[in-house]
Amino acid sequence: MAHPDILNHRRAKEAVNEIAMLLKDNQPIAIGEVVKAGSLGHGTAVPGDFDLDLVIYSPDVDTHTMRYKGFGKWLDQLETFLERQPKVVITKRTKFSVQFKFDDIIDVDLLVSPYWNNQHDFYDFLRGVPKEERYEYSVCAAKWQVEFFEQQPNQVKELIKRAKAWRNKLWSERKLSNKPKSYLISLLVLNAYEKATKRMGTSNTRRIAEATMDELKNLLLNRHGIDIYWEKFYSVGGGMPSGPNLFPTSLPRIVDPANPANNLYDTGVAKSRGQRGDGWSELVENIHSVDLLQRLV
């Protein structure tokens, strides 16, 4: 008999497909593409943790309205449509998303983005946005984040899941406040894994996990000098379209492989309003307890 978490994961995947078809069939706003983003879309979700980011890339969403009035116009239309669906319970509305539970199985953040022809168009848009506002448009990069993780080996995705499970347990049990975001954990573990496999190859799974843990701890203990980026993933047609006014030029930096304007060192840790410091102390103080050898179901 299959483990309950495996059965629940299957049900969650079926629910995701059902939601996508519901949106595509009814078109509450014009739909160019529906992208399963976040941990489920990246293939790094912890078993039993079924939160989904679902991004609608729509030709209805124009950059001028988005830039000066926000996403509210299109989220209003989506919320009105979802309220009429029998399997949907709206749980929250933010300025970036409509949040709902579907069929009592999965929690969904539904977001919208313009339908970009390519990354270059998105980067061109960001150049016209003040630096302090660029993070608000990170949703637009969701499809390229998914593409980036599709190219990563299953071996590292398993290690990312274990790191996220460690984070979830630790922050819950100790009631810590500055919780690192899943995407930050993914990029840190991936960078540590790349360093580990560069030294020793990929053949011995246990040794790779141990070496990745060592690299991860070293990264965090020297966090003020962190310099993580994947240059080739910012290129379109062999060029570097991001330009110096998008790509962060000073350390520490952990640059989103899909969006050079997003430095996860600044945006990847939850902080309370008015909190001093960079919010990394809890993660650094507890990294010695991370266990990437612990198998998940």
Image: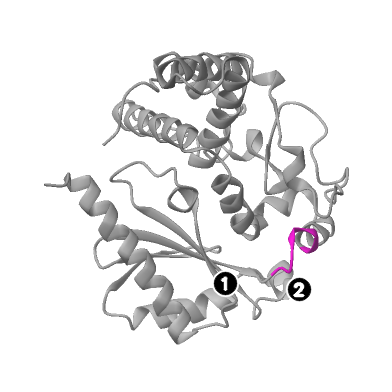
Label 2, residues with CA under 10 Å away: few <14, some 14-19, many ≥20: few
Total marks shown come to: 2
Question: For this rendering, which residue is in front, 230 or 92?
Answer: 230
Q: Secondary structure at mark 1?
A: strand
Residue 128: percent from left, percent from top = 84, 60
| Residue 294 locus on image (x, y percent) | 32, 23
Observer able to see residue 269: no
Q: Earlier in the sequence, mark 1 or mark 2?
A: 1
Residue at 50%, 64% in the rendered image: 97
Q: Is residue 113 toward the left or the right of residue 232 in the image?
A: left
Residue 3 versus residue 140 in the image, above or below: above
How many other residues sit within 10 Å of disc 1, few (<14), some (14-19) or many (≥20)?
A: some
Residue 278, quarter of the rendered image = top right
Q: In the visual, does 265 lie left or right of 201?
A: right
Q: Residue 154 placed where, x, y %? A: 46, 38
Are the two marked residues, 1 and 2, in contact with CB atoms closer than 8 angstroms?
no
For the view shown, which residue lies furthest in the front direction? Answer: 203
Q: Does any portion of residue 124 appear in the rendered image?
A: yes
Q: Which residues are magenta?
A: 116-121
Q: Is residue 176 above or below residue 272?
A: above
Nearer to the camera, 207 or 187: 207
Image quadrant for the C terminus?
Answer: top left
Image-quadrant location for residue 11:
bottom left
Marks 1 and 2, Cα distance to the nearest angstrom? 20 Å
Residue sitting nearer the eye, 16 or 238: 238
Q: Which residue is mark 1?
A: 33
Q: Position of residue 281 (x, y in %)?
A: 53, 21
Task: Tell me the amino acid under the disc marked 1.
Answer: Glu
Q: Residue at 22% x, 46% y: name it.
A: 5
In the rendered image, which residue does mark 2 sit on? 64
